[in-house]
Amino acid sequence: MKLGYLDLTLFLVILTLGAVILGKYIAAVFSGRLKFLAIIEGPIYRILGRAASDEMSWKEYTVALMIFNIFGIIILFTIQLIQGVLPLNPAHMAGLSWDLALNTAISFVSNTNWQAYSGESTMSYYTQMIGLTPQNFFSAATGLSVLVALIRGFKNVENDKLGNFWRDLTKSVLYILLPVSVIFAIIFVNQGIPQNFSAYQNVNLVEVQKIAKSPDIKTQVLPMGPIASQESIKMVGTNGGGYFNANSAHPYENPTPITNLLEILAMLIIPAALCFSFGRMIGDRRQGYALYIAMTIIFIVMTLLIMNAELKGNPLFNTLHVDQAQSLFQSGGNMEGKEARFGVLGSGLFASATTAASCGAVNAAHDSLMPLGGFVPLFLMQLSEVVYGGVGAGLYSIIVFAILSVFIAGLMIGRTPEYLGKKIESFEMKMVAIIILVVPFIILCSTALSVIIKPGLDGVSNPGAHGLSEVLYAFTSAANNNGSAFAGLNANTVYYNLLLGLNMLVGRFGVIIPLLAIAGSLANKKSIPVTEGTMSTSGGLFICILIGVIIIIGALTYIPALALGPVVEHLLLYTQ
Amino acid sequence: MHIVIKNMHAIRYYYIRFLKFAMSSHKVKLSLDKRIVFNALSASIKKLNPIYQVKNPVMFVVYLGSILTSGLGILSLAGYSMGGSTGFIISVALWLWFTLLFANFAESIAEGRSKAQADSLRNAKKDVTAKKLRANNASNIAKSRDFELVNATVLRKNDMIFIEAGDIIPCDAEIIEGCASVDESAITGESAPVIREHGGDSSSITGGTKLLSDWLVAKVAVNPGESFLDRMISMVEGAKRQKTPNEIALSILLTALTIVFLLVVVTLLPMSVYSVKANHSGIPITITALVALLVCLIPTTIGGLLSAIGVAGIGRMMEANVIATSGSAVEAAGDVDVLLLDKTGTITYGNRQASNFYPVNGVDKKDLVKCCYQSSLADETPEGKSIVLLAHKYDLTKEDMGDKSQMEFVEFSAQNRMSGVNFENTEIRKGAADSIKKYVLAHNGKCPVEAMDIVESISSRGSTPLLVAKNYQVLGVIELKDVVKESIKEKFDELRRMGIKTVMITGDNKLTAAAIAAEAGVDDYLAETTPEAKLFKIREYQQMGHLVAMTGDGTNDAPALAQADVAVAMNSGTQAAKEAANMVDLDSSPTKLIQIVEIGKQMLMTRGSLTTFSISNDIAKYFAIIPAVFASTYPALNILNIMHLKTPESAILSAVIFNALIIVALIPLALKGVKFKPLSANQLLLRNFLIYGIGGVILPFIGIKLIDMILALL
């Protein structure tokens, strides 16, 4: 466990330092101070013409965003359907079924990257490169744009213009996502992740595999490709869609404990940095620190919980006298479904980070986590992905919780609530209500439906409490745009493809649209000066209240479901 | 006719008494008036009408749950059980009905108390007689006395009335002719009469006050039913009571939470069915248990008390003798962070006090002091008393004091603007510089230049000079100084800690204003104020995002009052001021603004604290209900039964009973409001968070356990 503390501490120090620096940079990008890529930016804006020059109201901003995203879904859907006749398809992959294509299109556009297929046997190079990869950038850039629009909503004084979506999108990709992913890609190459366009390699095995009644296996096909760069944006954009089906458990995606730590860093760095950018952009850095601290506290507690649960190992093994202790020679704990090079701690940290950020990349089988270990990723997603969260999405979601906290706590000081100088009134509360309703609504209804009707139950491979956890996990992951899978659930059916697609769509845009409405409404308001009578939203007390609201709203909604899933599983395991 | 007038006095007297009584402390009323409680009980049953219930989504869910469980109970009695024992289902149904009744009761009792006040006000308004002029022509009216006696309720706007010394003014009116002193003590509590005259800001007279001298011709300013009293009556009766903006926003949140929990509970059934099938043991959760879980989880505590808190907020304003024209005004009062305060009466004692005597032309100071003392002996005004007090410091002998019984005192009147004393051959007068000067010159006396110089220098430092003359010779000058109230500095410090800025408004010159501002510790001041300057200042603060409160009385205050976020008009002020304001202070007390802000804050705090409490309660309820409802499927979950509740049924029932009883237990808090302390925002937050947040987590664990123990005994 000591090693775990050390890992975690070291990681948090690096994350914080990196986030502070990157945060300053991002703030500078959106303030328009940085222009070193004007050569590329300029022509893009010229092509877009007036669309890229006019300041937009929240409605115009939303329309532009929706057009862009719907367009993205249509293009991606079409590419997948007709990939058989498109170029760059040496393996002659056929077009996908319509439901899978639709599910995948929504999945990549909504920054979920839920994969109901395995990449190496389904997608052509063309689909991967022209279809999926750009969406890794665009979906993250969409999240960033929404956040920037929201920040402008807080900053504006009686001015309803939230900026220009096309410009925000362009800046996000050019100045932030591309450079950061290039840096990580270079480090990944250095660490041994392949980055080439070579054909798949046929190599001789060191040890011949003997299988009864079959010829000996002497060679193996090694897949190649531009993996390092794909890996980089998969993490940096909190996408999580793996190059290989094994995702970050695959040695080519994640070869060493160092790349493991770097990948965790990559998926948290932008969401964490945005806290600091936020503070700078609204002109009160402490506001950003407060959100960062709140996120980090939840993250530490959850990570320690999963590390602890996994380190303890499986109690059923103890009766079989299996040594599960951590030592110099073995990482110990519950090693089922984990890679030996990461061990329990590296896998635990990865699992909590990938569900904290709405990344969804995995380096271990979450289905094989201990019940309490599996509870952690599930719960982190159910908190609406606010602990760092997706690029942009994490911060704008925690701001919704901050508004909610301010509303409840703010009244206790005898004033109508305000956040960052803006009064929180009924319109904002209406939108906040929609946001906190829409995600639980879609998750709970889908889960309940799936455990009683046949198409739903058909996909469940493990009956019992664990089966419920699997279904709940799938919908929670989809609706919160995480994309990680608990496995065990056969989700590539028309029923699950469509229902999960709906979950992703609602979970993404059911939050973004009301959020932009809040931004528009706030932008039109006066800014109230800070006095002694203003409730501080950067102090320790507010951080506690914010954490309380996040946990209570998250927990109160899912407690019964969690009780019937991982909690009872855990209790049953330990009482058997 | 004389008798009629006499009777009218008596009626007027009782009207004022009654008004005062109606406005008196709620605490007394709550314990005394059983009728309110009784009426509230019957009203809470009447409010079970679905048309009424549907207005409150949280309680409507409880309502539907009550009907559903009652139906299940009846079915169960008839032998068609849908799960659970009959006794259990009926108990849950009963307690759900109680939950509803308790919430209705809270609202009814808050309304009942306001309604009782409104009723007594309405009763008091009857049977008042006025002298209505036959001709709407004021000329020579005092001599012609051509009026008829009518009931005050038939008076309409623009009717002319005649009032003479001894009369009680029948309604709010505007003086057309005449000048008189009016005793407003019934409303203001101030015994010193005030001068009301035609023209200027003191031309408005208020119904219920008494004319002491002279006569007036006045024009009725409002129709019956349009006065603030009437507006208040209609408001407290609920007909015009609308939800305030913050109440609406909070209702949205509460509704959202209710829907979330509805979702949780509705989706729990299939999950439970799945678990039972998967585990091959136990029975799925019953409908009764689901309804119980739902009602416990939705924020019924705040949902049930929300409207009571709003009504009680307006009620507390009335306790403070402030009539708010809307609930939103009360709410805005809590948000105010800039107070525009009139210097006179708020920061300084409205009455100036003697601070020095200045003899002129070589007059012995002792002589001057002696004359001042004698002339003020019978002067009951605060100024007069202060002169006597100051004179005592000059070691006057018994002889100096003179024989009071031999003296004939001349009282201050609106016309001559001076007072004094006549005895033996002496005639002493003191008064405003110009009046004394005129008086002295009229009697061939002289007004020395030295005296006028002193007068000027006193005026220039913001004090008031009084000239003193004996036998038409000016002896010297008394300086009356504005004295800053003793406790005001601390009050302002308190306000500052609460984040409220104070701005002093004064007609004084900048030097004087700066000196008083520094002494009183206000944050800002506005000297040589004109109505335009006031309006501009308010706009300036509002531009910076502040919410501004002010008090005003004059017609020229009306634009500023209309601009301010919280505008309190003095009841003694002009009709225009009252129209522009959103609150009227019956006491016309300048310091009332501070109290109004506190009441506004208190109402919001109560709302927030009970919301926090209500949500925090859910944690314990989960621990009670979740292990109970799934006990048959997963006995392992009993580990979560940390309260060790006896049986699953008693656990659910205990949670439901706690949920109902907590509403009753919190009614007094909802009505009285949470304790207000002038602390900074963060201290307040910590305090209320610990009490209502943390307390809200812990209390139900204890409460539910206790109820479970009692149920086990039964």
Image (spheres, coloured by chain):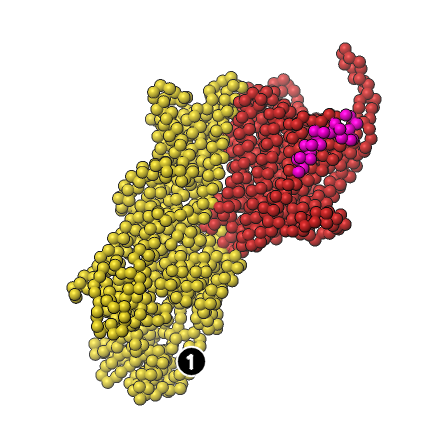
Chain A: what color? red
Q: Colour of chain B?
A: yellow
Is disc 1 surrounded by few (<14), some (14 to 19) or many (20+) residues within 10 Å? Answer: some
Q: Quadrant of residue A379?
A: top right
* Residue B68, image x, y percentages: 39, 28
Q: Using the image as rendered, state which of residue A261 and residue A36 is in the foreground.
A: A36
The residue under the point 42% across, 53% down is: B329
Q: Nearer the viewer, residue B168 or B675?
A: B168
Residue A484 to residue B476: above or below: above
Quadrant, the C terminus of chain B = top left
**Residue closer to the observer: A407 or A88:** A88
Measuring 64% from the left and 19% from the top, which residue is drawn there? A321
Percent across and percent down for residue B75 are 36, 22
* Image position, residue B338 (x, y; %): 47, 59
The residue range painted magenta reads A71-92
What residue does disc 1 label? B456
The answer to whether residue B392 shows anywhere in this view is no
